Image: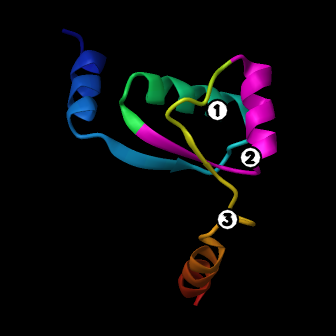
Amino acid sequence: MGFMDVIIEKAQKNVKTIVLPEGTEARTVEAASKLASKNIVRPVLLGPLDAVTQTAESAGVNLDGVTVIDPTTGDHLEDFSREYYNLRK
């Protein structure tokens, strides 16, 4: 068993959620799709749903197992704003 196999096995035993802010970048969308399909992490992509979906279609990947959140209109906008404000103090 190689080094990466060990890392992947450990990650699959303790699946974490990661947030990827570049949700409209093809490489990020491809990585999120691969990570979700291998059940390594639960990826969350930030960006407008239409743009993220279009990027995924252009890249030829599906978003099964990937959550997409638009931080400018989502339910968490106030929470994000408050946290950003606190970090900038």
Front in this rendered view, residue 4 or 43:
43
Disc 1 versus disc 3: nearer the observer:
3
- Which quadrant of the structure image shows residue 13? top left
Q: Nearer the viewer, residue 45 or 65?
A: 65
- Residue 70 % position (x, y): 70, 57
- Say what amino acid the circle numbered 3 marks: Gly
Which residue carries the number 2 mark? 49
In which quadrant of the rendered image does the N terminus lie? top left
Crowding at mark 2 (Cα within 10 Å: few <14, some 14-19, many 20+) = some
Residue type at mark 1 is Val
Left or right of residue 13, residue 86 in this image: right
Q: Is 80 rendered above or below residue 14?
A: below
| Alpha carbons under labels 1 and 3: distance apart | 19 Å
Residue at 52 percent across and 50 percent down: it is 19
Classify 10 Å Cα crowding around label 3: few (below 14), some (14-19), many (20 and above).
few
Residue at 45% x, 48% y is 18
Q: Which residues are magenta?
A: 42-60
Q: How is the image coloured?
A: rainbow
Could you tell me which secondary element the residue under label 2 belongs to?
helix
Q: Nearer the viewer, mark 2 or mark 1?
A: 2
Quadrant of the rendering where the C terminus is positioned: bottom right
Is 58 placed left or right of 1 in the picture? right
The residue under label 3 is: 74
Q: Which mark is residue 29?
A: 1
Q: Secondary structure at mark 3?
A: loop
